[in-house]
Image (spheres, rainbow, N blue to C red):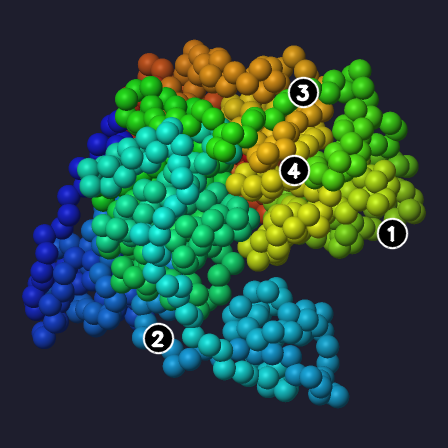
């Protein structure tokens, strides 16, 4: 959680002066893991301003960076090299530059590494290409063509034309494979149409009729558009119409000529959201996520930089696009852990959205049915304003919720569904309605072991069991991507055909359901069964068209979807998220189960939710059944406050990793011996991380807890500065950690 001190720090970053004429020294920040900018001299015939993109010499090569202010002047004039040229690109806006500095300081990252996120599409800085060329598989392959596995994957993916880089990514191959197939005549070049952006949203189009509660919340948000920086929490029960309410603020920002950014936690959520946006504004917004083609990324970046991208909806990285006229940010499902970036520059997009709003003097709306404890604490402290929608829209009622105590009503042998849940599914399908079975576990089984000796199939690069994906016939590590086929015999005891799947994933659950309901139309919706937003949209459309009777899904089905005929939600393992040492385990489980429960009964048909659990007395289960979220959050807040944990204290994780376990242990021990001390400062560790080996690197963790007023970044910096360089060991700093693996 960002403290009031941190919020004010974001506002204290001062812009650099302005115009630099020939001979002036300037600082140029490069998108490299560098802590500071380099001095360059403005050449004759050129004038530059802060934010300009420039090409500069760097060693024996050229690099593109951004003018970051006046030069420091501590470089020998004879060694200060000249800028080569200014690029024909709109300058990086002042709020974007302020945000780069702030994020770097807060996350203790190199400024250049943060800048790289704002310059994530280098091709967008260069003149546009003459026209994209795609490649498609030839109808008749050359007779002498040798087909390797990589070539087969490319040809399978090339049924439709794709640019070379996109085709390589889709097929999981290298560009050299594409080039070789093209030279052999197996791939044919075809011209591709240039990227055509959607039309501008029509802000004057009438929206739906709002209830009194909705209209009041929308009015408050619209009034904030001209009022400078503010943070509003839009809290509403599932189905209360939060999206339509903040659409009114989007329309107001557009009417004032401003750009709008909407952040969604998962791209799978965008399917129905995009349709709702198009109905409201007559067109689709521009999208920003990892599944975009290279051309779409280039054009979207340019449109954002030129102010022509009026509305952008995207994942967390969309926050770093260079918006010159940004007037509103919306963070939908603000509580979602997917907003935390765990690699590279480690940041929380929700918190950085607040920073971006502050440095740009604009409002930000945080929307959720189950707000994070961090956001609620900011509301209670008076830093954020709360707008509340306590009722479902259109008279729909919240679903009836009940627990199934698996100790009293256990599933049959080799089954995962209680007779009570099976009966409810049967009744729902017989009534011509739809059911959802929720299990937040991908694949067929989370663990495969040898029946003869107990050997468990583990990833060779991570401390993780291999997950069986029976549909595609392979075992896979969900942490590093390693995959293999199921061995014919046990590597430990040589027993043949001895491996047994343990526990259910969604694929195994589907197998059980198909045997119990052979006439039902069943589908599985998980992140690894959806190839992208298009596949998610098709699945949503099938549900809306009543082509599916029973949907089985992971967390991608839990949020943002509206299925009018879905009247039953069955949670197969409500206890799944409660295990482990995560301090937010109870909060996250409550949020996730509340969200998935909210899929039921959203229209005129009443809904019900059944939660299978071995812990019916757990506070999370009690809160879900009683509907008393306020009491649950109050108890969570009290426990965190007593232990000094976030949001009432501050945590920092130091993760040391390396290929040599002994070197990592030695470095961790040295760090621990010089750990900072002081009132309220607690250093835990070092200890092996729960994921002790990840991608072949051994990992050790130290966790630092301090009272919130302490400037923890300065303390960590001083601590690390006392250590000699650790050969072969990388130290990663995670301010406000969310993941504890």
Residue at the spot x=30%, y=70% of the render?
62
Disc 1, SS: loop
Q: Which circle marks residue 128 in the picture?
A: 2
Which residue is at the front of the view, 580 or 575? 575
Toward which corner of the image does residue 518 lie, by quadrant? top right
Q: Which of labels 2 and 1 is toward the front? A: 2
Q: Which of labels 4 and 3 is toward the front? A: 4
Q: Which of labels 3 and 1 is toward the front? A: 3
Disc 4, SS: strand
Q: CA distance from mark 4 to mark 2?
A: 47 Å
Q: Quadrant of the N terminus?
A: top left
Q: Position of residue 103 (x, y in %)?
A: 31, 42
Which residue in the protein does label 3 denote?
402
Residue at the spot x=55%, y=83% of the render?
189
Which residue in the protein does label 1 denote?
488
Q: Is residue 242 left or right of residue 621?
A: left
Disc 3, SS: strand
Which residue is at the front of the view, 190 or 444? 190
Residue at the spot x=29%, y=65% of the render?
64
Disc 2, SS: loop
Residue at the spot x=52%, y=48% of the render?
272
Q: Which of labels 3 and 2 is toward the front? A: 3
Which residue in the protein does label 4 denote?
566
Kindly tell me whether residue 532 is visible in this rendering: no
Dots 3 and 1: beta carbons under 8 Å?
A: no
Q: Position of residue 18 (x, y in %)?
A: 10, 56
Q: CA distance from mark 3 to mark 1?
A: 44 Å
- For marks 2 and 1, the one nearer the N-term is 2
- For marks 3 and 2, the one nearer the N-term is 2
- For marks 4 and 2, the one nearer the N-term is 2
- For marks 3 and 1, the one nearer the N-term is 3
Q: Is residue 487 left or right of residue 656?
A: right
């Amino acid at each position: 959680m960002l403290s009031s001190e941190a919020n004010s720090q974001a506002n204290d970053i001062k812009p650099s002066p302005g115009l630099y004429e020939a001979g002036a020294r300037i600082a140029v920040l490069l998108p490299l893991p560098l802590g500071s900018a380099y001095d360059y001299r403005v050449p004759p015939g050129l004038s530059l301003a802060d934010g300009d993109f420039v090409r500069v010499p760097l060693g024996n090569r050229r690099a593109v960076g951004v003018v970051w202010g006046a030069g420091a002047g501590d470089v020998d004039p004879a060694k200060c090299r000249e800028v080569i040229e200014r690029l024909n690109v709109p300058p990086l806006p002042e709020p974007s530059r302020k945000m780069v500095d702030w994020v770097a300081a807060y996350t203790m990252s190199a400024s250049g590494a943060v800048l790289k996120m704002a310059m994530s599409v280098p091709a967008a800085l260069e003149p546009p290409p003459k026209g994209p060329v795609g490649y498609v598989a030839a109808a008749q392959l050359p007779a002498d063509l040798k087909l390797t596995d990589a070539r087969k994957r490319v040809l399978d993916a090339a049924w439709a034309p794709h640019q070379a880089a996109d085709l390589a990514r889709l097929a999981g191959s290298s560009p050299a494979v594409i080039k070789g197939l093209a030279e052999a005549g197996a791939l044919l070049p075809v011209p591709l149409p240039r990227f055509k952006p959607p039309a501008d949203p029509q802000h004057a189009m009438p929206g739906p009729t709002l209830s009194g509660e909705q209209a009041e919340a929308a009015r408050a948000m619209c009034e904030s558009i001209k009022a400078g920086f503010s943070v509003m929490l839009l809290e509403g029960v599932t189905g209360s119409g939060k999206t339509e309410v903040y659409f009114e603020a989007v329309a107001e920002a557009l009417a004032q000529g401003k750009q709008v950014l909407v952040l969604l936690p998962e791209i799978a959520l965008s399917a129905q959201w995009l349709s709702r946006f198009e109905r409201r504004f007559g067109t689709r917004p521009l999208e920003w996520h990892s599944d975009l083609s290279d051309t779409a990324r280039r054009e979207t970046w340019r449109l954002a930089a030129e102010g022509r991208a009026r509305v952008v909806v995207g994942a967390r990285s969309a926050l770093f696009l260079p918006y010159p006229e940004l007037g509103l940010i919306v963070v939908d499902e603000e509580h979602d852990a997917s907003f935390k970036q765990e690699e590279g520059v480690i940041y929380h997009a929700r918190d950085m959205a607040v920073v971006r709003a502050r440095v740009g003097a604009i409002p930000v709306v945080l929307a959720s049915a189950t707000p994070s404890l961090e956001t609620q604490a900011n509301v209670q402290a008076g830093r954020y304003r709360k707008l509340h929608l306590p009722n479902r829209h259109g008279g729909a009622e919240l679903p009836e919720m009940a627990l199934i105590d698996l100790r009293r009503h256990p599933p049959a042998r080799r089954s995962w569904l209680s007779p009570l849940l099976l009966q409810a599914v049967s009744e729902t399908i017989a009534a011509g309605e739809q059911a959802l079975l929720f299990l937040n576990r991908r694949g067929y089984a989370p663990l495969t072991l040898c029946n003869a000796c107990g050997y468990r199939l583990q990833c060779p690069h991570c401390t993780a069991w291999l997950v069986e994906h029976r549909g595609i016939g392979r075992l896979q590590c969900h942490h590093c991507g390693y995959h293999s086929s199921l061995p014919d015999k046990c590597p430990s005891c040589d027993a043949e055909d001895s491996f047994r799947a343990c526990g259910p994933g969604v694929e195994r659950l589907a197998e059980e359901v198909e045997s119990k309901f052979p006439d039902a139309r069943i589908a599985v919706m998980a992140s690894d069964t959806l190839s992208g937003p298009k596949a998610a949209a098709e699945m949503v459309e099938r549900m809306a068209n009543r082509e599916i009777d029973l949907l089985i899904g992971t967390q991608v089905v839990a949020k943002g979807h509206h299925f009018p005929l879905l009247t039953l939600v069955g949670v197969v393992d409500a206890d799944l998220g409660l295990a482990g040492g995560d301090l937010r385990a109870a909060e996250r489980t409550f949020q996730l189960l509340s969200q998935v429960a909210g899929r039921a009964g959203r229209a005129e048909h009443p809904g019900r939710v059944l939660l299978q659990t071995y812990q019916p007395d757990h506070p999370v289960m009690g809160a879900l059944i009683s509907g008393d979220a306020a009491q649950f959050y109050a108890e969570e807040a009290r426990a965190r406050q007593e232990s000094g944990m976030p949001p009432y204290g501050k945590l920092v994780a130091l993760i040391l990793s390396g290929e040599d376990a002994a070197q990592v242990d030695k470095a961790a021990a040295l760090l621990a011996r010089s750990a900072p001390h002081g009132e309220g400062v607690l250093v835990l560790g070092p200890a092996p991380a729960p994921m002790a080996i990840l991608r072949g690197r051994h990992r050790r963790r130290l966790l630092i807890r301090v009272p919130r007023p302490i400037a923890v970044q300065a303390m960590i910096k001083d601590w690390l500065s006392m250590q000699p360089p650790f050969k072969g060991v990388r130290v990663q700093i995670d301010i406000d950690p969310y993941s504890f693996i």
